[in-house]
Image (tube, grey):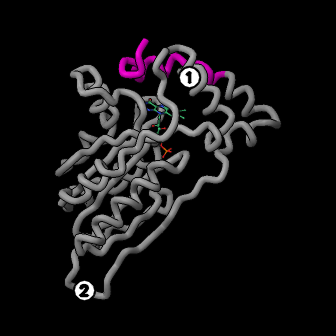
Amino acid sequence: MSAQKLSRRDFLKLSGLTLGATAVACSGLGYAATRTPRLATPELTFRKDDSMNQHILITYATRAGSTAEIAVAIGETLAGRGFGVDVKPVKANPALDGYDAVILGSAVRMGNWLPEMVDFVKRNQIALGQLPVALFTVHMLNLGADETSHAARLAYLNSVRPLLKPVDEAFFAGKIDLETLSFVDRLIVKMVGAAQKNSSLGDLRNWSEIQAWSSVVF
Ligand SMILES: Cc1cc2nc3c(=O)[nH]c(=O)nc-3n(C[C@H](O)[C@H](O)[C@H](O)COP(=O)(O)O)c2cc1C
């Protein structure tokens, strides 16, 4: 099975592993098994003292940090374009008041945006409906240009797309560094790797592509 074709279902099948994980979690080892080492969730402001600037919130959901780094890179480019930008983890539950536009970015796990971002969208659906909203998704599978890959990555947004009218959607290749994953996540990644020849590990982020999108969004 190729990396491109590994679907959400495959991931879910492999996550039969989560049964094992649950067993571990129920034991005294649970905390250590699910803890993500050294996760940085930056909260940054790029803002000139100019109330005439338009202000953009970039909020992100991450498990291992690569989506946070992409959010910061997008913020830097937007700030360079003259926007006032706040970059915040969605777990900080940022307020939407005072922003002219919002970017929501999430890592994909098991074929979906992370649940805290889906919850944020649900809680803020009305306010988000009154603002231009752009989305970015960070993932490692279904990166190809073929129809099957394209359809599979579009499906990562199935839980939020019906709730939003995004002005733009970007899909960025992410990063898997086993060192930054919890024990259970490493296990899942290794199982996926064993199930396919071309499993993607490493840092596949394409910073030029990320900058190019940030240069034109909004
Ligand atoms: C346990 C686990 C499950 C994943 N599930 C998927 C998936 O279903 N589809 C996909 O394209 N990528 C999947 N990925 C890859 C992540 O989306 C990718 O590593 C991303 O860069 C992680 O972002 P983060 O570092 O911000 O958490 C998975 C990674 C892990 C560790």
Quarter of the image for residue 215 reads bottom left
Residue located 26% across and 20% down the image: 148
Quarter of the image for residue 94 reads bottom left
State left or right for residue 77 relative to residue 181: left
State left or right for residue 99 relative to residue 6: left
Residue 151, horizontal then vertical, whole percent: 25, 25
Quarter of the image for residue 108 reads top left
Residue 76, horizontal then vertical, whole percent: 35, 66
Local packing at callout 1 (Cα closer than 10 Å; few below 14, some 14-19, many 20+) is: many
Residue located 57% across and 39% down the image: 177
Is 52 rendered above or below residue 14?
Answer: below
Residue 210, horizontal then vertical, whole percent: 31, 51
Question: In the rendering, which numbered label is found on residue 77?
Answer: none
Is 49 rendered above or below residue 202?
Answer: below
Question: In the rendering, which numbered label is found on residue 15?
Answer: 1
Residue located 39% across and 57% down the image: 71
Secondary structure, mark 2, is: loop
Q: Earlier in the sequence, mark 2 or mark 1?
A: 1
Q: Is mark 1 within 8 Å of ligand 1?
A: yes
Is residue 147 or residue 24 the one in the foreground?
147
Residue 97, horizontal then vertical, whole percent: 31, 72
Q: Which residue is mark 2?
A: 51
Q: How many marks?
A: 2
Bounds of the magenta segment: 1-19
In magenta stretch: residue 187? no
Secondary structure, mark 1, is: loop
Cα distance, mark 2 to mark 1?
A: 49 Å
Which kind of residue does numbered mark 1 sit on?
Ser
State left or right for residue 205 relative to residue 150: right
Q: Quadrant of the N terminus?
A: top left
